[in-house]
């Protein structure tokens, strides 16, 4: 370990960069700077609904399941921890998640998942249509063949969370620059046939760093291109298969609506079905809901589709078909965002950057970045600890 604290530069301050910075800030061995070209949580994170679907996902074991569970487990302590540090409250819905099932849904598969979860000591209930109507009268859809209730899944407000993470990390000494559109790197070859990135540049400013973490979501593709463009041509050829990073935008549109009164007077879970969520906004606004989001794929060249009102209308009609009482709602506003989806490979991308000895990628979280952020931050911590314990 060097005597001066290693300087860690994190590029991108969405949920992944902010949560990583906060977790690292608890280790006094590091000096940390976070760089973004805009205010925190304005990218994909700013559009997210913050639904944390872990227990109800079909991931049962292995790395993917552990990442989901790490998220659910960490948020349970992280939210009160951040509220205590910052004094601001973070809307965190702990009423679980209700998934509606329709024709074609494999109810036997859900029963089997419930058995697996029971062995993991996690509650998952499969409900008949009669049980659904009795417990959740706000749901009235003639096509529902049953439902699954997961008490341990959650939903939180991603932007408020990101802001709280930034504030708490600042209190722990992390530096932030929100005018830093990183457009250039200075790198040099090392004796181990890799490159070492020394400096990040933006506008007329620069920052020297020992380790660089790219958490730039959709911006990561371009940043990796810039880093790889300085690698020797021979190495480029050798590593052709792996040197590019292709993350593409998947559009999501959503609505914020207000009813004269809440859909239910009992604790309200997030309602999910046919890829749509109806999420109560916060305990302070029990009659307001987020409804979303569409999943609209890019074209073959990777360009996101145009915003179409028709997709929002479809979304709204589906929500109305689940909970007819929504017909009394006023639509307050709609929004959209782009999910960072790795092309041709599973999300997320957690790996060292090929050809470099000091760049880590924690990006491409597609539809579950809020859920997976704690596991990704943990991966960065473990990688850094391993790198910094090696003799230089
Ligand atoms: C409509 C919608 C609904 C969603 N709902 C959910 C949900 O319910 N649950 C869930 O878990 N996930 C959800 N997601 C997915 C989730 O939002 C993403 O997976 C997550 O936000 C990705 O976080 P990120 O920090 O990697 O990216 P971002 O939030 O996009 O952050 C990346 C940051 O990098 C910065 N950046 C990029 N390039 C540069 C550069 N060159 N220099 C400086 N800064 C740069 C950007 O300005 C940005 O702030 C949803 C997404 C959308 C769009």
Image (spheres, rainbow, N blue to C red):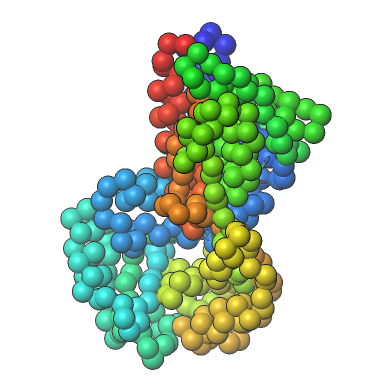
Task: Decide: is 52 above or below 208.
Answer: below
Coordinates of residue 382 in the picture (x, y in percent):
40, 29
Coordinates of residue 136 in the picture (x, y in percent):
39, 79
Coordinates of residue 303 in the picture (x, y in percent):
64, 61
Task: Decide: is 198 above or below 132.
Answer: above
- Residue 392 visible, this orientation: yes
Q: Residue at x 60, y 54 (%)?
A: 44
Q: Residue at x 37, y 88 (%)?
A: 143
- Residue 259 visible, this orientation: no
Q: Residue at x 34, y 49 (%)?
A: 64
Q: Residue at x 48, y 72 (%)?
A: 276
Task: Decide: is 229 above or below 42.
Answer: above
In the orientation shown, which residue stands out farthest toward the right? 204
* Tally of numbered tags: 0
User: Which image quarter: residue 256?
Assistant: bottom right
> Which sits in the foreground, 110 or 242?
242
Task: Decide: is 97 above or below 139.
Answer: above
């Amino acid at each position: 370990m060097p005597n001066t604290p290693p300087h860690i530069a994190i590029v991108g301050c969405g949920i992944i960069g902010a949560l990583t910075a906060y977790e690292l800030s608890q280790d006094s061995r590091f000096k940390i700077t976070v760089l973004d070209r805009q205010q925190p949580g304005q990218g994909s994170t700013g559009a997210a609904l913050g639904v944390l679907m872990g227990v109800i996902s079909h991931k049962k074991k292995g790395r993917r399941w552990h990442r989901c569970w790490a998220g659910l487990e960490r948020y349970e302590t992280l939210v009160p921890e951040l509220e205590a540090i910052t004094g601001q409250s973070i809307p965190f819905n702990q009423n679980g998640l209700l998934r509606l099932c329709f024709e074609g849904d494999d109810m036997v598969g859900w029963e089997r998942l419930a058995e697996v979860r029971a062995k993991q000591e996690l509650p998952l209930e499969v409900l008949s249509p009669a049980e659904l109507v009795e417990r959740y009268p706000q749901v009235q859809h003639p096509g529902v063949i049953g439902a699954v209730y997961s008490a341990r899944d959650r939903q939180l407000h991603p932007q408020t969370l990101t802001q709280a993470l930034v504030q708490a990390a600042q209190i722990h000494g992390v530096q932030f620059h929100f005018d830093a559109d990183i457009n250039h790197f200075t790198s040099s070859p090392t004796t181990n046939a890799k490159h070492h990135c020394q400096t990040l540049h933006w506008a007329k400013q620069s920052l020297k760093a020992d380790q660089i973490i790219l958490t730039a979501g959709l911006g990561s593709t371009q940043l990796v291109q810039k880093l790889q463009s300085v690698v020797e041509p021979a190495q480029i050829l050798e590593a052709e298969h792996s040197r590019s990073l292709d993350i593409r935008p998947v559009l999501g549109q959503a609505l914020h609506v207000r009813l004269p009164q809440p859909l239910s007077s009992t604790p309200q879970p997030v309602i999910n079905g046919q890829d749509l969520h109806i999420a109560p906004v916060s305990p302070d606004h029990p009659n307001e809901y987020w409804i979303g989001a569409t999943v609209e794929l890019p074209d073959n060249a990777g360009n996101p589709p145009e915003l179409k009102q028709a997709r929002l209308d479809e979304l709204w009609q589906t929500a109305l078909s689940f909970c007819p009482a929504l017909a009394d709602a006023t639509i307050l506003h709609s929004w959209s965002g782009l999910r960072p989806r790795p092309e041709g490979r599973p999300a997320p991308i957690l790996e060292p950057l090929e050809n470099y000895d000091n760049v880590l990628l924690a990006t491409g979280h597609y539809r579950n970045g809020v859920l997976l952020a704690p596991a990704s931050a943990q991966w960065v911590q473990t990688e850094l600890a391993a790198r910094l314990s090696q003799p230089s």
